[in-house]
Structure formats: structure tokens, C-alpha cells
Image: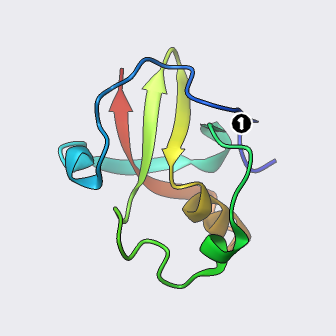
Amino acid sequence: MIFKAVGEGRPYPDHGLVSPKDWRSVSPRVVRLDELVTIKRTLDLDTLLSEDSTFYGDIFAHVVSWQGDLYLEDGLHRALRAALQQRPVLHARVLAL
């Protein structure tokens, strides 16, 4: 199993961070893929296979820690790419709510 669970939508309250610039104040750390709950059920294979998929965004995934779970808000494609490369961890900015 790659992720702890696959969800649909954000179960946590709005945190107000919208753009990659907003997330810059959140320090990145390493998180295990099997501890993440996704908030998206679908992905775009073109984005997954693109070599420059993070060119216009943050190089770190965005994760929200809420009520004991880690929700993968942005970075599903990066997380799946890491799993395909058999890497069990991902560097992510983790926002604690």
C-alpha cells in the first residue's frame, strides 16, 4: 500500500494558504508515504510523467496535519513518482492545524 488512505476533499478547516508563496513560511521535512491520506482520488498521467511537473510550483509537497492524520493537499503526482521510484518518503511542507 502506498498511502495510509485515499480520501476525497479536505476534511480539515480552511487554513488560508493558497499559493506556493504562502507556503514558504512552513519548513519542509521528510514524511513517509504510508502515513499520508490523499485528498484527491484522481490524477493526470501527463502531469505524473512530465519531467518539469514542479517547474511553476513549490518543489515540496504540501501536507496538512490535522487530528492525528497527515493530509496530502498538493503533491500527489510527486508522491506517486517517489513510490514508482521505490522511495518510501517525500519532502513536504507540513502545516499543523
Residue drawn at the location 59% of the way across and 54% of the way down: 76
Q: Position of residue 16 (x, y in %)?
A: 29, 29
Which residue is nearer to you in this view: 37 or 88? 37
Relative to 4, is 13 above or below? above
Q: Residue furthest left?
A: 25
Q: Secondary structure at mark 1?
A: loop
Which residue is nearer to you in this view: 38 or 17? 17
Residue drawn at the location 43% of the way across and 17% of the way down: 13
Q: How is the image coloured?
A: rainbow
- The quadrant holding residue 11 is top right
60 relative to 44 in the view: left or right: left
Q: Residues within 10 Å of mark 1 (few under 14, many from 20)?
A: some
Query: Which part of the image, by quadrant, shows the C terminus?
Result: top left
72 relative to 6 in the view: left or right: left
Q: Position of residue 10 (x, y in %)?
A: 55, 27
Q: Which residue is mark 1?
A: 4
